[in-house]
Image (spheres, rainbow, N blue to C red):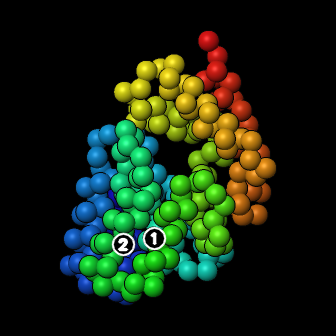
Amino acid sequence: MSDLKTRWFATTSHFLTDGTAEIVWNLLDDCYSESIRGYHNWNHIADCFIQFDEAAHLANNRTQLELALFYHDVIYDPKGSGNEEASAEFAAETLSRAGFPDSEIAIVHQLILDTKHQVEPKSFDGRLLVDVDLSILGADPARFDQYETDIRQEYRWVELQAYRAGRAQIMQGFLIRPQIYFTDYFREKFEAQARDNLASLIAKLSAD
């Protein structure tokens, strides 16, 4: 947490005063610290930044990408829908109040919407962001298993068989893609392991 907070201040230092940065950070912290979050919490954001830092040299607009990473799961309700839209609006509202330029807010807003993972992002930065967000799919098997445990915690209110069926369908959606990752960097790094992880999980979820 301390590293992320330091990073937040560094990322926003050119357009936020320390006082405003502290206020906005506290808003983020309130959201990412919610008890309902098993996976979509500060640990996920920290993991995303680890992956991003290794590929940051590829980014066209690093500040906007870092802001999108901070905000992309700020609103998360596993019982609802439209979390990405709500997160994008939350980012736009708080950044606008903080004095961030509208033209740059629009970029952050679109980057967050890209994490809906429904279509290939139009921008390279969008493709880089969604690859970072999906890097967990290519993690080592033990870490991937923990990821699935954390997701199940978020959906613990769903009956087991219904959860298995729905989760298998979502994972199959990623597996049938011609490519899971959009950038050469992440495809070379994670594609093969991600396909192994997904196939293994789908088999487990489909087992009696």
Under circle 1, the secondary element is helix
Query: Is residue 191 depicted above or below 70 in this figure?
Result: above
Q: CA distance from mark 1 to mark 2?
A: 6 Å
Q: Is residue 189 visible?
A: no
Instruction: From the top left corner, tell me how far across and down residue 86 is, in percent.
Output: 37, 58
Quarter holding residue 128: bottom right
Label located before the other in sequence (1 or 2):
2
**For the point 45% across and 85% down, which residue is it?**
103
- For mark 1, does the 10 Å Cα neighbourhood hold few (<14), some (14 to 19), or many (20 or more) residues? many
Query: Is residue 197 depicted above or below 157 in this figure?
Result: below
Instruction: From the top left corner, tell me how far across and down residue 150 is, in percent.
Output: 45, 36
Q: Is residue 205 visible?
A: yes
**For the point 59% across and 59% down, which residue is it?**
130
Give 2 or 192, whichever is nearer the viewer. Answer: 192
Query: Is residue 172 depicted above or below 162 in this figure?
Result: below
As drawn, is 20 to the left or to the right of 51? left
Quarter holding residue 169: top right
Q: Which residue is mark 2?
A: 92
Q: Which mark is residue 35?
A: none
Q: Which residue is mark 1?
A: 109
Give 7 or 123, whichever is nearer the viewer. Answer: 123
Q: Are marks 1 and 2 in contact (CB under 8 Å)?
A: yes
For the residue marked with disc 1, what is the amino acid? His
For the residue marked with disc 2, what is the amino acid? Ala
